[in-house]
Image (tube, coloured by chain):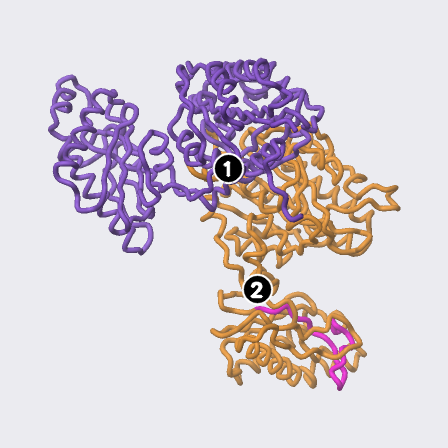
Chain colours: A purple, B orange
């Protein structure tokens, strides 16, 4: 028997709603995407309620669901997933927060949540200063690590035996109001202690930052000082069985943003770095496809994640979204041309709808198309939110996609005998 | 961003099965309903398995499901919902029974389950006698309230700390057999005591009623004496989060029958009384639509419930059912004409199938159509049990409807980030 492999292309937030200025069409319905349509024409399609009907998925929960995990059972916050995707080691007992360098006044009122979108150089020097302080005078609680990632973004990791994710953010999520005090969100001693630790660290970091030479220099240049670290999105690693254990596969992922990388890594997928894959509008989608074709020599399941379709909807740039969909199509074109179609399943979907009207994630289902050997193809010819609703797959849940793909690879186990 | 509101029209038991004497069509397929068809043509449609495929819903469980509640988790009997819909105060610890004034002979054999459909005047006088007796000589157990509602129907409420819904009915549900003794349905002390209380109260009420002047008068007129109170449908209030807490909405309901009113009130919906809304064939459906349009000034989610479509199927009157569907259409016509369609979601469905053949609720799914801003409309033109099965929504569960509507209103919360 032939050994079948699979490539799954997930375009972030690619699905949308009918838009007035596209004459009632969606970006997917307007975009020129001959290869995705070819895939749809050759295969079977349908709609995915990624989490549940009407529920807008986050990018983290969406990818967990599309990889077959029941989000309600396993999800425990974004922080740890993003941290592990940023190449920070995370133990099952660690907490991780997403942090911003930000600017506060003398009364701790937040002036700028991103410290004027501080550049990598300044952020690295300040993060180093915090790290040095933590090394010279270690806090009473276990292991604390602070690391900047891109611009104002950074990660705080706290390790120790008695921590709890049940703490509130210190980030007020808007400028003009005071820094928040972290509060326990349940009555446990662990939550109370974790909140105390977070508040203590926040004040310590402030002391390190407020008169740091980098900030003196910034003030002279009329740039907002990065004098506080705001924390949000606390999380622990989800306790999940990695895909190799569940399906006996050797999976890999090609993704540019830390959050999706983190989900894939946690799911036991090998991350494949691709030059030119940036997570921005300029990302080189064909380079990702090329890397996937290459990776098929070693791996039998590859996820390609493309981010910028989502950005275009948050920015309300439907034309840019259309262009990005056409770049996704270019990747699919490369895949169709270069994979052995007799031995490869190729699927395209989105991780969620991003409504260009609401400019945020929305709860409508997303279209999915699957082609490959032994697929029961249907008669839908075009990939879209309304065409795929008539497809042979019907409406499935996000967690159904992996078993459906793995069945095509002969990797699902019989229930019973 | 525009603030979107929603009106949901629920026609009780409107869905049906193909009928021989309608040439294999359903009442919905025969009725002239241009406005519901217009809504369907403009919007997206599908089928709802209100509880689960094949399961015939009750009107109480159906409305709980359509309002987004998992019936298996929250439902605890009809009595309390009907009581609260009849403007009787119910505490979370109270039990409530639906009761009939009925006629028994000297051996407690039931002669007439409705005491000759006793009129409101006689019923009120007898209920008053029971209330007086309860006041003069309060039973050992806590708080007992007895109140007649319409004709032979009445409510018995028992309050106290150690009660259980696990008791059987005293109503044998048919004439010609003896009054039943209430029995505990589990081994708990609470169930045993509740059964004892119910049996004691039944005998007490009988003593008050048997020689009451009203019954002496009825016997002289050859009317069946209302000499017993039969109890059934014990229930407690479901423990549910009200809709305003779950979705941040300000919901209202326009309904004529106590049971549906009770569900809506328990779900935290403001009840809007409408003159001419009777729950009968003569109900003024347009008056309900008018009240809904008016209520949209204060509320952002309004449920309109129309009862008589269901009555027609129980009575096996398909032509009357067709007429009632046309009255539902008149309400939808008024809504389509008078709401701001750029800012309002309008949905039509049924709470269950009522089979005119079985003359009772049946487990087939019901059609649903949704129109409004940003809806991914499909190409189905007519509202019906078979046309909507081809709609873009696919087959959803009853509990999915609220999240789908709330997503269109931007009221669902993102899962994850």
What separation in Å lies between label 1 and label 2 (alpha carbons)? 39 Å
Chain ID at mark 2: B
Residue B111 lies in quadrant = bottom right
* Residue A212 relative to residue A304: left or right: left
The residue wearing badge 2 is B80
Above or below: residue B290 compared with residue A340: below
Nearer to me, B293 or A295: A295
> Which quarter shows the N terminus of chain A?
top right
| CA neighbours of label 1 inside 10 A, class few (<14), some (14 to 19), many (20+) | many
The residue wearing badge 1 is A65
Question: Element at badge 2?
Answer: helix
The percent coordinates of residue B175 (x first, y second) are: 78, 74
Above or below: residue A56 compared with residue A373: below
Nearer to me, A59 or B181: A59
The residue at the point 53 percent across, 56 percent down is B266
The answer to whether residue B129 of the structure is visible from this angle is no
The percent coordinates of residue B20 (x first, y second) are: 88, 46
The stretch in magenta equals B96-115
Q: Is residue B110 magenta?
A: yes
Q: Are marks 1 and 2 in contact (CB under 8 Å)?
A: no
Above or below: residue B47 compared with residue A226: below
Q: Is residue B95 magenta?
A: no
């Amino acid at each position: 028997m032939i050994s079948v492999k699979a490539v799954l292309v997930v375009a972030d937030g690619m699905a949308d709603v009918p838009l007035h200025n596209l004459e009632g069409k969606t970006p997917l319905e307007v975009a020129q995407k001959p290869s995705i349509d070819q895939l749809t024409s050759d295969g079977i399609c349908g709609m995915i309620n990624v989490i549940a009907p009407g529920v807008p998925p986050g990018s983290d929960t969406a990818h967990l669901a599309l990889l077959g995990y029941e989000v309600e059972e396993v999800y425990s916050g974004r922080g740890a997933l993003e941290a592990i995707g940023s190449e920070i080691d995370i133990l099952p007992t660690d907490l991780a927060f997403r942090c911003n360098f930000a600017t506060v006044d003398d009364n701790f009122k937040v002036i700028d949540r991103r410290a004027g979108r501080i550049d990598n150089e300044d952020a690295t020097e300040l993060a180093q200063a915090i790290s040095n302080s933590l090394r010279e005078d270690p806090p009473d609680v276990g292991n604390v690590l602070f690391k900047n990632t891109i611009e104002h973004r950074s990660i705080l990791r706290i390790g120790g035996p008695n921590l709890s994710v049940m703490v509130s953010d210190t980030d007020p999520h808007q400028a003009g109001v005071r820094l928040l005090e972290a509060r326990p969100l349940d009555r446990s001693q662990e939550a109370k202690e974790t909140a105390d630790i977070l508040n203590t660290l926040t004040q310590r970091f402030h002391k390190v930052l407020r008169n740091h030479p980098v900030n003196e220099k910034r003030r002279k240049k009329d740039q907002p000082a990065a004098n506080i670290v705001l924390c949000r999105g606390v999380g622990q690693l989800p306790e999940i069985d990695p895909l190799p254990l569940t399906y006996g596969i050797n999976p890999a992922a090609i993704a540019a943003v830390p959050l999706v990388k983190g989900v894939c890594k946690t799911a036991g997928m090998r991350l494949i770095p691709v030059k030119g894959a940036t997570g921005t509008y300029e990302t080189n989608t064909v380079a990702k496809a090329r890397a996937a074709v290459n990776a098929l020599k070693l791996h039998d399941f590859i996820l390609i994640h493309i981010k910028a379709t989502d950005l275009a909807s948050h920015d309300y740039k439907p034309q840019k979204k259309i262009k990005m969909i056409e770049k996704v199509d270019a990747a699919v074109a490369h895949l169709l041309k270069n994979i052995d179609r007799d031995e490869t399943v190729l699927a395209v979907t989105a991780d969620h709808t991003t409504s260009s009207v609401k400019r945020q994630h929305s709860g409508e289902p997303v279209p999915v198309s699957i082609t490959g050997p032994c697929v029961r193809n249907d008669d839908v010819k075009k990939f879209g939110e309304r065409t795929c609703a008539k497809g042979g797959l019907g409406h499935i849940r996000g967690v159904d996609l992996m078993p459906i793909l793995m069945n095509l690879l002969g990797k699902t186990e019989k229930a019973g005998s």
